[in-house]
Amino acid sequence: MKALEASMNELMGFPLFAGYNKLQILDLCQGGQIMTSSHRDILFHCGKEAHCFGIVLSGAYKLTKPSPLGEDVIVHFSTPGEALAAFIMAQPRPVYPVSAIAMGPSRFLKIPKENYINSWKSHPDLIFRIQNMLSSRMNMLQDQKVMAKSPLSQKVAMLLINLLDKDTEQGNASIKLPMTRKEIADNLGASVESVIRIMSEWSKQGIIQTADQQIHVLKVDKIIEHLNDANLK
Amino acid sequence: MKALEASMNELMGFPLFAGYNKLQILDLCQGGQIMTSSHRDILFHCGKEAHCFGIVLSGAYKLTKPSPLGEDVIVHFSTPGEALAAFIMAQPRPVYPVSAIAMGPSRFLKIPKENYINSWKSHPDLIFRIQNMLSSRMNMLQDQKVMAKSPLSQKVAMLLINLLDKDTEQGNASIKLPMTRKEIADNLGASVESVIRIMSEWSKQGIIQTADQQIHVLKVDKIIEHLNDANLK
DNA sequence: CGCTCGGTTGATGCACATCAAAGGCTGTGG
DNA sequence: CCACAGCCTTTGATGTGCATCAACCGAGCG
């Protein structure tokens, strides 16, 4: 738990706080703490009562939920600038619907629930931005649901596209967060082996390339093409 | 499009407006129209610009989205009291992310977008209720995602439980909306035939019973048991 | 050096989708 | 009033995408 000031630059860069000045942000985040997590550290547990919400500062967190079969399913990947658990603060006695686990070293600004109910509530524009975040996350979930009957390779393609950083330069792009095949599988509801079979095929074809947990997409158009193609492979 | 007054009783009964009086509700809904839909009427189309949001008054609507394979996937079933498209009103130029189609005769209160941005926005409690609706819908989507690897029969069981009306009397309950097996399949990302095979088995065992599109669950505990059971069937 | 973790590959089987065919039911138009 | 077209349900036969099981390898690490 370090000083809030130190991360002010990051905070001011996030769309969530666009147009707010330093003082306003300090007020909104007062009493907040900066949590630094190592790889696989757990930020909060699914099912526990939620006293805080917060914002991802750096790195990434995966949001997981235990399946009836014991293994954890990854519901969402959260990247810097995203708000976590803000959506449930409006409930009388909120409970985390998922667990949050760090993927590599990450940092998180943890803010007390009271702030949301007191100061955030009186900023309708802020609440609207939260609402937009939430609705865009729901959209992603719906899009995934729509692909339920598509072949696994298309689901993988979709996931890659969604996670791509937009610094595309001539059809070349990469995914910032360190992601294992298992995590991809856990997100898609598939088995590791199946994901590997698909992705190593793409590696051979030079469409993607993995180095040190970082996935680079060399031929974005090929992936998109695959996404739209009716014929599988 | 009938007078708003006529449906005031319904509106006042919804949790969304709990604690609000007639005048306040009239103000919030001013300029609204009551749409009456017949079976399979389309309320709005996925992809069209959204000038209105609204509230389901009676009957039910299914929210669908076209899949890459052409067929429509059902993303959600909306029942009376639920708000539709309210979540996206905060966007500068909102577009319906799904289509809404009536299941049997239904009624819908259609409210202009401006109301949300003007009058609704200044009622933080109202916005919080909307946010809670949205987050509970997202929870359902997440729960479904978690069951991705479970056998189909458990997914069907889960769906039935979620749709059950809570007027349970000695393990007997029923689902209000008229639902075909195809709609269940379209919601679960399965084929009609598979759903039928599962449900007719349950019918034979006297666990459920269908009459005139209404599904009655005679032995709720059996369904719940099936949901938790590790062994499939 | 044993350990865990991530990736990879092959063999086998099963839960579903798919295809096909048929009967009941409702509404619609000639 | 009958014919016809849709829609919903059902049942059986056949095929397949992917899970599962079982190994094995290389790399980082205490």
Image (cartoon, coloured by chain):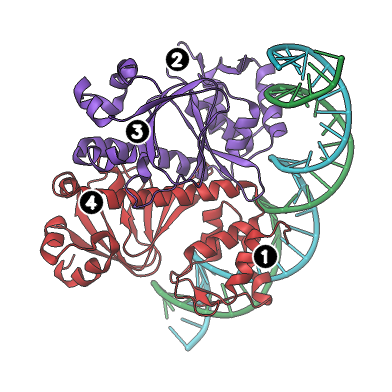
Chain colours: A purple, B red, C green, D cyan
Tell me the mark number nearer the camera, choosing from 4 and 3.
3
Upstream in sequence: badge 1 or badge 4: 4
Q: Residue at x 59, y 49 (%)?
A: B147
Tell me the mark number nearer the camera, choosing from 1 and 4.
4
Q: Residue at x 45, y 20 (%)?
A: A165
Which quadrant does the N terminus of chain B fall into? bottom left
Tell me the mark number nearer the camera, choosing from 1 and 3.
3
The answer to whether residue A146 is above or below residue B151 is: above
Q: As shown in the figure, which amino acid type bears the numbered disc 3?
A: Ile
Dot 2 falls on a residue whose secondary structure is loop
Name the subunit of mark 1.
B
Q: Is residue B37 left or right of residue D30?
A: left
To the question of a shared chain for discs 1 and 2, the answer is no
Q: Residues within 10 Å of mark 1 (few under 14, many from 20)?
A: few
The residue identified by callout 2 is A168
The disc placed on residue A111 is 3
Asked if the residues shown at circle 1 and circle 2 are in contact, with their CB atoms under 8 angstroms apart, the answer is no
Name the image quarter holding residue B40: bottom left
The residue identified by callout 1 is B197
Tell me the mark number nearer the camera, choosing from 2 and 3.
3
The residue identified by callout 4 is B125
Dot 1 falls on a residue whose secondary structure is helix
Asked if the residues shown at circle 4 and circle 2 are in contact, with their CB atoms under 8 angstroms apart, the answer is no
Q: Position of residue A32 (x, y in %)?
A: 33, 29
Q: Residues within 10 Å of mark 4 (few under 14, many from 20)?
A: some
